Image: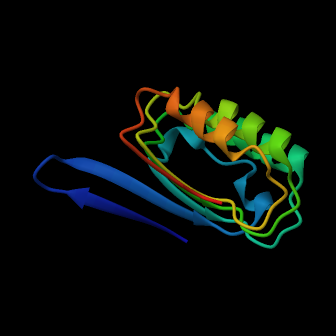
Amino acid sequence: MGCVQINKKNKMIIDKQYFNELDALQNLNYQIYFIIEINLSHNYIGDQGVFDLSVALSECVNLTILKLDLISNIFFDEGIINFASGILKCPRLKILMLHINNNRIQRKLKLRNKILKAKRLVKYSISY
């Protein structure tokens, strides 16, 4: 489900897209999305899956806001840290909301530090 809003004051088009299946992210025109909300909770996504997701999202050159729910999957530290490296390649990303509760992550501080290195982030939240 997607929606387009036109702000008449700034004449800005904001495209917001919701996803709840990993397969739905394939074959998209990543150039057009500014706001993406993805709910992939309880999908048995492992390290390779979160890495593939970060590669796909890093192609979203206009992405400014990302809300990602990956609650109760099966990835470890390596997977989410690689994910952070990939997603931080989005040149316009300003707001990141990451929900990764109930996974197999031990080095939460390393993930937080990786995200803090992205100076362009105005706001971020991580729920473990």
Image label count: 0
Compared with 8, 61 (above or below) is above
Looking at the image, residue 90 sits to the left or right of residue 65; the answer is: right
Q: Nearer the viewer, residue 2 or 75?
A: 75
Question: What kind of colouring is applied to the model shown?
Answer: rainbow
Give the percent coordinates (x, y) of residue 32.
Answer: 48, 44
Which residue occupies 59% across, 40% down?
112
For the C terminus, the image quarter is bottom right
Of residues 1 and 76, the one nearer the viewer is: 76
Q: Is residue 12 left or right of residue 36?
A: left
**Residue 118, above or below 39:** above
* Residue 19 placement: quadrant: bottom right
Relative to 89, does residue 57 appear above or below in the rendering? below
Question: Can see residue 60?
Answer: yes
Q: Position of residue 97 (x, y in %)?
A: 51, 55
| Quadrant where the image shows the N terminus | bottom right
The residue under the point 56% across, 38% down is 60
Residue at the limit of the structure toward the left, as seen here: 9
Residue at (43% x, 26% y) in the render: 119
Whether residue 59 is visible, yes or no, is no
Front one among 2 and 87: 87
Q: Position of residue 91 (x, y in %)?
A: 48, 27
Q: What is the x, y in percent for residue 14?
A: 35, 53
Q: Is residue 106 above or below residue 121?
A: below
